[in-house]
Image (cartoon, rainbow, N blue to C red):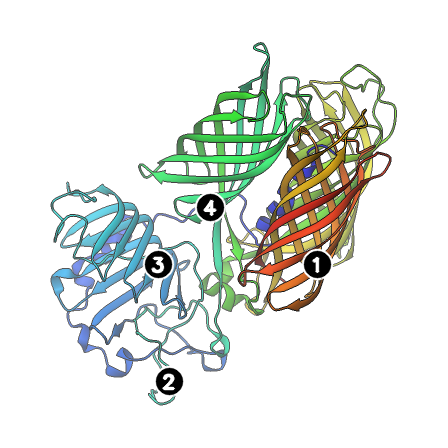
């Protein structure tokens, strides 16, 4: 199928969203507000930090459930005995939480945090509040982000982002908006010491909080039996969760975003234009750096079936509290719709401005779309709509733990949301007016296979993203990429049977099907039957239309859905019990490059090499086997527009040093680009060698065959993959 090859995008979206959990609209942290700043006045600083009892100054205690204190004070201070510096860290609201990572020597807070820095020199004492903060108490490096407010010497400054090193007194990165007619930035002369330095320690932040630990004052203290971290730091006592049997605990909410975009580009014919919609899911690696998967498809014009998929890397620089500069680049592959895409490689750099409305951001960008080995080259003005969300990440080998231990103080504000990844099978029966782009009537049944990901916003409403491609019916290369909204209506008291009506919009085309500019709309209703808590069968029927073309189809089909639970920082789903076990589900993302040797072309006796890029997403069912979904598109070899997508399974052989053999068997659909794939049905066996670089990363090299049913495509391929291992929270 054409461009179903980027089913990988939807599959990865399912992993990054469903398997890890999120609120789709991603509510932002609340501004602590100026009333909270009143608690940061100088009167709140302890006048004598050495007045705390010795036992308290020199001790941490990690409470187990058997040793949990009956009640914990909301504020308590500890002293670092190495330099007599007193740190007092406390949440601003009941939603605030504090985490300690003994391994990395970092303290992290989120949900609104206050920090008091109290060295012996009274004039150096300071107070900082921020939405999120992080401190490395060994190196002295701090980051504060989100509504940062600093109070010192009766003066107040506001900031969006601040980076500072206490130890070296290096003031690195800061963006301040002044109050009280004071100005503070990298170059002002009123800094206490010299430029780029500040004598008042500030404080900390990062968005991925890890290792929640409750730090309490023991009722009795025995230095011979109490293990002490080194160096020590005092942290406000607050019930953020308890470490069971002193094990390391990790609860990390990673920030991500959905990006929707639209732009119109010029085609080689000066009278032709094509409207491109874009969809991406991006990980925020740093406050200023993001990246992930993106796809673009035709929505207006006359190139229905034009799709590309690939990777985006971008940076964001805050100009004010709301405005930011956004720049980045996309590299992908695809084509279709008889467009002049050449080999299929697409490049798209962009730069522009973005305004943050809170729950979403709106951006206006200048972009440049270029197919280096084709004839499409055009600048454009793109409109972006970004929706941030937070999702849970776990390390590959994190053990099971209770929800209270995992989420800390926020466990009672976290809810379970249903998610599901489905294998889709459809039978389209085109109406009498459906035609090809050449005007020929389409009167045969079209079989499609694809993948669907659904995420439930609450207990009833859900959003879904799906892609599928033709595997028979004489329209090899036809593909769809849709997104929509649905509602689940239980029909039985045990919730085993339910109706699921929905509406979807998106792009479709290729395979000679006349979808006009590519825009399609669909209405459908499904009947779900829960085979087990993790598996559902959904019978589905509906109607799809291309308003700008000549393609209208009623259809029937079914989904085989794997049901999981996601977690979101809201109370819209099912509530968590504090004793609910949180397990680790293992996944892999594999960016892939494949080289087809002598791939057979349509209508000739010629064969020639072509190169493809794409992605694979794997669910690890055990130590030796996995299920996989894969999508690729051609970018070189004069096969622009050829794409394929596959489902399959893989196995591993015994490990030898850092190496391990693997084998895969895939089935799916592919077509387009003048490649002789017949009706589009493909099967694809392969073997290879994996070499471990680290716990989370590996590389692979393999060899295999791609064989079409009903076509002449029968080619050997070589592949190289990067492997990224990660975990998600589940049950």
| Closer mark to the observer between disc 3 and disc 1 | 1
Q: What residue is shown with label 4?
A: 27
Q: Can residue 478 be seen in this view?
A: yes
> How far, Cα to Cα, is label 3 from label 2?
26 Å
Left or right of 207, for residue 634: right
Name the spot of residue 298 as percent of width and height, x first: 62, 25
Residues tagged 1 and 2 counted as in contact (Cβ below 8 A) = no
Residues tagged 3 and 2 counted as in contact (Cβ below 8 A) = no
Left or right of 215, for residue 723: right
Of the numbered discs 3 and 4, the one sitting upstream in the chain is 4
> How far, Cα to Cα, is label 1 from label 4?
42 Å
Determine the residue positioned at 30% across, 71% down: 233
Determine the residue positioned at 29% across, 59% down: 141
Query: Regarding mark 1 in the picture, which secondary structure is present there?
Result: strand
| Closer mark to the observer between disc 4 and disc 2 | 2
Of the numbered discs 3 and 1, the one sitting upstream in the chain is 3
Most foreground residue, 112 or 275: 275
Query: Regarding mark 4 in the picture, which secondary structure is present there?
Result: loop
Of the numbered discs 4 and 2, the one sitting upstream in the chain is 4
Query: Regarding mark 3 in the picture, which secondary structure is present there?
Result: strand
Which circle marks residue 226 in the picture? 2
* Vertical side of 503 occupied by 130: above or below: below
């Amino acid at each position: 199928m054409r461009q179903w090859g980027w089913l990988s995008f939807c599959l990865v979206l399912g992993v990054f969203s469903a398997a890890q959990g999120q609120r789709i609209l991603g509510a932002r942290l609340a501004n602590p507000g100026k009333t909270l700043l009143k608690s940061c006045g100088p009167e709140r600083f302890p006048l004598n930090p050495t007045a705390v009892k010795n036992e308290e100054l020199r001790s941490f205690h990690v409470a187990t459930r058997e040793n949990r204190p009956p009640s914990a004070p909301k504020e308590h201070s500890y002293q670092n005995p190495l330099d007599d510096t007193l740190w007092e860290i406390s949440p601003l609201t009941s939603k605030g939480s504090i985490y300690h990572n003994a391994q990395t020597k970092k303290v992290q807070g989120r949900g609104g945090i206050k920090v008091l820095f109290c060295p012996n020199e009274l004039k150096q004492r300071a107070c900082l509040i921020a939405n999120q903060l992080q401190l490395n108490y060994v190196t002295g490096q701090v980051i504060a982000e989100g509504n940062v407010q600093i109070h010192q010497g009766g003066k107040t400054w506001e900031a969006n982002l601040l980076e500072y090193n206490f130890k070296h007194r290096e003031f690195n990165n800061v963006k301040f908006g002044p109050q009280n007619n004071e100005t503070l930035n990298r170059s002002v002369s009123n800094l206490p010491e010299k430029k780029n330095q500040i004598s008042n320690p500030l404080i900390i932040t990062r968005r991925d909080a890890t290792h929640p630990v409750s730090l309490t004052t023991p009722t009795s203290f025995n230095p011979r039996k109490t293990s002490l971290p080194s160096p020590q730091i005092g942290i406000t006592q607050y019930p953020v969760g308890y470490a069971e049997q002193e094990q390391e605990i990790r609860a990390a909410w990673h920030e991500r975003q959905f990006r929707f975009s639209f732009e119109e580009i010029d085609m080689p014919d000066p009278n032709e234009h094509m409207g491109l919609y874009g969809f991406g899911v991006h990980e925020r690696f740093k406050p200023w750096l993001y990246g992930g998967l993106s796809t673009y498809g035709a929505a207006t014009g006359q190139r229905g079936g034009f799709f590309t998929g690939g990777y985006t890397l971008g940076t964001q620089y805050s100009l004010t509290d709301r405005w930011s500069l956004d720049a980045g680049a996309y590299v992908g592959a695809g084509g279709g719709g008889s467009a002049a895409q050449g080999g299929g490689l697409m490049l798209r750099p962009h730069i522009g401005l973005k305004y943050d409305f809170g729950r979403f951001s709106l951006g206006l960008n200048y972009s440049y779309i270029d197919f280096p080995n084709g004839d499409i080259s055009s600048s454009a003005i793109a409109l972006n709509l970004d929706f941030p969300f937070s999702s849970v990440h776990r390390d590959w080998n994190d053990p099971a733990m209770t929800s209270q231990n995992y989420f800390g103080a926020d466990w009672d504000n976290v809810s379970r949301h249903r998610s599901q990844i489905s294998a889709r099978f459809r039978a389209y029966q085109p109406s009498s007016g459906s035609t090809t782009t050449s005007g020929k009537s389409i009167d045969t049944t079209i079989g499609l296979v694809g993948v669907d990901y659904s995420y439930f916003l609450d207990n009833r409403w859900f959003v879904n993203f799906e892609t599928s491609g033709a595997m028979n019916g004489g329209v090899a290369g036809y593909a769809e990429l849709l997104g929509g909204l649905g509602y689940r209506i239980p029909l039985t008291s045990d919730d085993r049977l339910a109706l699921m009506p929905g509406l979807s919009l998106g792009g479709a085309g290729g395979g000679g099907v006349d979808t006009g500019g590519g825009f399609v709309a669909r209405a459908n209703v499904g009947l779900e039957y829960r085979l087990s808590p993790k598996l559902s069968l959904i019978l589905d029927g509906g109607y799809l239309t291309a308003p700008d073309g000549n393609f209208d189809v009623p259809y029937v089909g079914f989904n085989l859905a794997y049901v999981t639970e996601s977690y979101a920082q809201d109370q819209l789903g099912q509530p968590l019990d504090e004793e609910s076990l949180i397990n680790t589900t293992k996944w892999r993302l594999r960016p892939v490059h494949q080289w087809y040797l002598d791939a057979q072309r349509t209508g000739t006796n010629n064969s020639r090499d072509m190169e493809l890029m794409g992605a694979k997403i794997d669910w690890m069912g055990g130590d030796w086997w996995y299920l996989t979904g894969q999508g690729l598109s051609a970018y070189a070899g004069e096969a622009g527009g050829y794409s394929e997508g596959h489902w399959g399974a893989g196995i591993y052989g015994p490990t030898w040093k850092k190496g391990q053999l693997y084998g895969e068997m895939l089935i799916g659909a592919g077509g387009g680009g003048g490649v002789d794939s017949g009706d589009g049905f493909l099967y694809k066996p392969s073997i290879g060698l994996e070499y471990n670089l680290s716990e989370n990363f590996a590389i692979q090299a393999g060899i295999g065959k791609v064989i079409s049913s009903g076509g002449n495509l029968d080619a050997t391929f070589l592949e190289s993959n990067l492997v990224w291992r990660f975990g998600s929270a589940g049950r």
